[in-house]
Image (cartoon, helix red, strand yellow):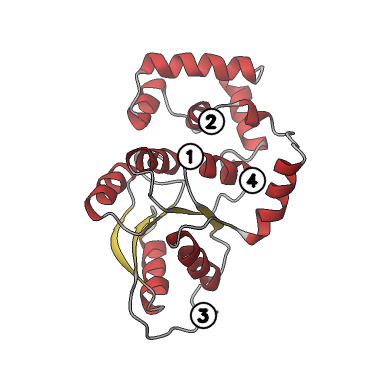
Amino acid sequence: MLNDIQFVDTPCTIRTMVVDDHPLVRAAYREVLEKSGEASVVAETDDGDIAYALYLEHRPDIAIIDLNICGTDGLEVVRRIRTRDEAARILVFSAQDHEIHITRALEAGAAGYLSKRGTATQMLDAVRTVAHGKPYIDPEHVNSIAYRRLFNCDEDPLQTLSPREFQIFRCLANGDSPGEIASKLFISPKTVSVHQGHIMKKLELKNIVQLVRLAINCHAVDP
C-alpha cells in the first residue's frame, strides 16, 4: 500500500477515525495517512460499539470503517453515526467490494466506498474527497453502478430487501441467532423474527440453508 505514494511535509488537516478488525491493517492506514502529512488518526478500534462511542467523543472529520468488524457490523455503525450526526462523513474501506455492498453502504449513509484492493494513492484521494463533503466510489465500480441506476437494472433479488432486512439477512447467513442479531442491531428478538419472516417471503425461501446459499451466490457474505 505504501509503495505508490510520495509523502509530503504539509500540515495535518484531516482528523480521522479508523475502524478495522485487523491491527496490522489499522497500522498501515495510520502510516499512509500520517506520513502523507494530510491527515492524523485521532481514534481507532476493531469494535463497532466502541467505534460509535469514539465517534461521538472525537467528532473526526472523517471515519474510515470496514464492514466486517467485531460487535456491531459496519453497516449498522454507519447507520447509527449518520442517525446521530447527519453531517458525518464516512468512507467504507472494505475487502467486500461487490456492488451489493457498495450500494447498501451508500444507503446506510456512507459518503464513499473504496476496495481494500485499492492503492495508497486511491485511499488518500478518497479520504480527501469525502472529508471535503464530496462522494467517492471505487473507480473500478462507479461506471457499472451508474449504469444500473440509470437504466434501472435490478437483477439482484436482494434489492427487494429494505436496508434493515438486508442487515438481518446477512446476520442470518453468517449463523447469528435472533437473540444475537437483536443485540447487534439494538432491536428486540421479536422484531428480528418479524423481519426474518418478511425476508423469507420476499425471497421465496423455505429454510435457512436456502438463505445461506442465496447470500453466498449474491456475494452478500463470504463463502
Is residue 164 depicted above or below 26 in this figure?
above
Of mark 1 and mark 4, the one earlier in the sequence is: 4
Looking at the image, the residue that sits furthest to the left is 57
**Left or right relative to 85: residue 174:** right
Residue indicated by mark 3: 5
Calculate the distance from the C-alpha at mark 3 to the C-alpha at mark 4: 27 Å
Residue indicated by mark 2: 166
Residue indicated by mark 1: 108
Q: Position of residue 48 (x, y in %)?
A: 34, 44
Calculate the distance from the C-alpha at mark 4 to the C-alpha at mark 2: 14 Å
Is residue 6 depicted above or below 58 in this figure?
below
Q: Is the Cβ of the residue at disc 3 closer than 8 Å to that at disc 4?
A: no
Residue indicated by mark 4: 99
Which mark is nearer the camera, 1 or 2? 1
Task: Please rate how many residues cluster around mark 3, counting C-alpha atoms within 10 Å: few if below 14, some from 14 to 19, many from 20.
Answer: some
Of mark 2 and mark 3, the one earlier in the sequence is: 3
Q: Amino acid at mark 3?
A: Ile
Task: Please rate how many residues cluster around mark 1, counting C-alpha atoms within 10 Å: few if below 14, some from 14 to 19, many from 20.
Answer: many
Of mark 1 and mark 3, the one earlier in the sequence is: 3
**Left or right relative to 159: residue 58:** left
Q: Amino acid at mark 2?
A: Phe
